[in-house]
Amino acid sequence: MASFSAPDDPSVSQCIKIVSIRSSNLGFSVRYIIELTRTGTSTGPFVGTILAALGISAYLVVAPSEYVAKLMQFTPISTSFKATILGLGALYLLLAWFGEQYIFPGAAKFVGWAKLAISGKPKTRKQYKVIAEKMRF
């Protein structure tokens, strides 16, 4: 038997459902916290950190102040090499996005299929995912 309960705060209850499952044969309650939806605020600090690192890196490559260049002992580089460094960074981001969208999901399915073909054992799923699927109507 399963029951849902959520905190009193409506903003929290929209993000997190706590599923309590009573195991009759073991005689104890097991609680799973299943995050059903993610809000933009949960990824905000991560995105902010990435943007700050990107901005600092671009500043250090393109136009660092003389004080910073002297402090970090930078070697002068040409403008074309700076453009090359930034272009390679942009190319990396483009390739990473393309890979995540189109290549890696198919490769993961292939690896799963190959693992099943070799070992003969199906993948064991995380228990909370199995429970979440059973709870959906």
Image: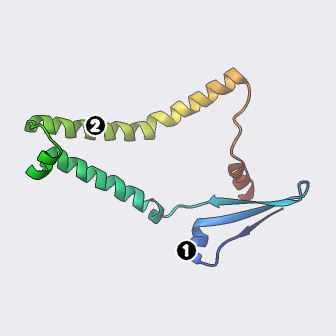
Residue 57 shown left or right of residue 7 in the figure: left
Front-most of residues 4 and 70: 70
Q: Which residue is mark 1?
A: 11
Q: Amino acid at mark 1?
A: Ser
Percent across and percent down for residue 8 are 64, 78
Q: Which residue is mark 2?
A: 91
Q: How many marks?
A: 2
| Residue at image location 55% in from the left, 74% down from the top | 11
Point out the residue furthest to the top here. Answer: 118
How far apart are the two marked residues, 2 and 1, measured between alpha carbons?
A: 39 Å
Q: Relative to residue 21, is residue 117 depicted above or below?
A: above
Percent across and percent down for residue 56 are 24, 52
The answer to which image quadrant residue 29 occupies is bottom right
| Residue at image location 21% in from the left, 40% down from the top | 86
Q: Is residue 65 visible?
A: no
In what element is the residue under mark 1?
A: helix
| Residue at image location 32% in from the left, 40% down from the top | 94
Quarter of the picture containing the C terminus is bottom right
